[in-house]
Image (tube, rainbow, N blue to C red):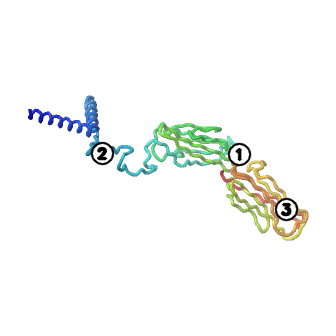
Amino acid sequence: MKTQKQSTKHLVRLLQRSIQFVRWNLLVLLITGLSLFLLRCKGMTSDADTQLVPILLASESNTASQLGGSQGGSVGTESPIAVDDLPVGIPILNEITYITNNANPADDPYSTKGLLQFQKTSVSFQKPVPENTEVTLYFGKKNMELHPDGTVTNALESLKRTAANFSGYTYLTDADKKVKVFVVAKNEFGLSTKQLTIGHPRNCADAMKIPATWGNCDDHCITATKVGETVELTANYNLPSQGNSLHLDLVGLSPRSSETIAPTVDLEIPIPSAGLHTTKTSFNINDKDFLCTKVVSFLIIEQPLRSAILQVYLSIPND
């Protein structure tokens, strides 16, 4: 009777230890079983290669998994993705290049047009992209807009190609006018865009950059400065002695016509004193579509008798 009771106790202890072992190693047993099942399924295909499925083994019952977000310990320091770390396929445009030329005389008998030429190498990527990556060029004025999803509104003209078949493009435009260009590259991995504000200069080819001074400021000169988004133009005349009937005009015109860019101002003094006389005008760069402005100042004085004209082309900065 005593031997039977001891055997029963031994079986109970063995059963308890077995249950405890299963509870402590349940995760390991489940993963092991799943791994064996996957290996068996993989081996049922005739041409399958043998692959080993990694198994996470716990050395202690309270060890936490470190895959993904951890419940304890450290999974390393997260660092920002550099360009070289980006997966192949995401389009990242390099800077867009282009050249300008005069239009063919047959297409431009009055020399008022220009060509914006994008060569095959004008559009390139920092890393290889799929051949079917869409590359679209949009051409328009200041009101053309690019939206976050890569769509463009108010374009005057567009060209759609792929990364595999883009061979360049030539855009005919009015000379001395600004053209807004959007380049949009898009595929299933992402989106990349570039914006240009460019043009073909003819009359504006030798335009001075602001700040600028033209003429002799000890006598008669024009100065240009930029304050914020406003370009301020000043005409100066230094009268050597008291005179009669001074007129000092200043205006900013289109480089192609008589269209006004900076309003005309006219300083009139019946009996001017000796010394410096000044008149000013200005314009906002956001309102202008031209590459430059032709600035003209007229000087007329009856005594001492004098007349002079100053004219200079000044580049209009991009907004």
Q: Residue at x 78, y 49 (%)?
A: 260
- The image quarter containing residue 212 is bottom right
164 sits left or right of 11 in the view: right
Percent x, y of residue 74: 36, 50
First along the sequence among labels 1 and 2? 2
The residue tagged 2 is: 63
Measured Cα–Cα span from mark 2 to mark 3: 96 Å
Percent x, y of residue 296: 78, 56
Q: What kind of element bears circle 3?
A: strand
Front residue of this view, candidates 14 and 281: 14
Q: Please name which of the two marks, 1 or 3, marks the residue nearer to the observer.
A: 3
Q: Is residue 225 above or below residue 97?
A: below
Percent x, y of residue 131: 47, 38
Circle on res. 112: 1
Q: Residue at x 46, y 39 (%)?
A: 130
Figure disc tally: 3
Percent x, y of residue 126: 48, 47
First along the sequence among labels 2 and 3? 2
Residue furthest to the front in view is 1
The amino acid beneath tag 2 is Thr
Circle on res. 307: 3
Measured Cα–Cα span from mark 1 to mark 3: 32 Å
Q: Dot 1, how many residues are within 10 Å of its Cα: few (below 14), some (14-19), or many (20+)?
A: some
Q: Are marks 2 and 3 in contact (CB under 8 Å)?
A: no
The amino acid beneath tag 3 is Ser
